[in-house]
Image (tube, helix red, strand yellow):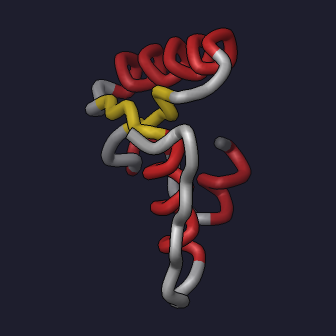
Amino acid sequence: MRKALEDANLNMFQVDGIAFTRGPGMSGCLSVCANAAKTLAAALQKPLVGVHHMVRSFIFIVASCSEIVLLVGSKHMP
């Protein structure tokens, strides 16, 4: 997080909200990330949003480039 904030020239107080991957995935990993996100959101008094991992991937890709993106999933799609 420190590196991402530095690269964006921001600090923690300039973040509008906290998002985390809520699934699907390995429950242990998801639980650790969810708890870290909840703690950070509470400490900063910011909104917390859990997102599906495919949606998270799509947002990351779109934010990273100006190309048209086709996101294809298999068993993970609802």
Q: Residue at x 52, y 12 (%)?
A: 35
- Label count reads 0
Q: Indicate left or right for 55 with 60 as reference.
A: left
Q: From the image, which quarter does the N terminus lie in? A: top right
Which residue is outermost to the bottom?
67
Check the image and report above or below for 63 versus 40.
below
Q: Residue at x 53, y 39 (%)?
A: 76
Check the image and report above or below for 58 versus 26.
below
Which residue is outermost to the right?
3
Picture coordinates of residue 8, whole percent (x, y):
58, 65
Q: Indicate left or right for 41 with 27 as reference.
A: left
Q: Indicate left or right for 41 with 33 as reference.
A: left
Quarter assignment of residue 38: top left
Which residue is outermost to the front?
75
Check the image and report above or below for 64 versus 25.
below
Check the image and report above or below for 51 versus 64.
above
Picture coordinates of residue 78, whole percent (x, y):
38, 39
Picture coordinates of residue 66, whole percent (x, y):
52, 89
Quarter assignment of residue 36: top right
Q: Residue at x 54, y 89 (%)?
A: 67
Q: Nearer the viewer, residue 62 or 16?
A: 62
Q: Nearer the viewer, residue 40 or 34?
A: 34
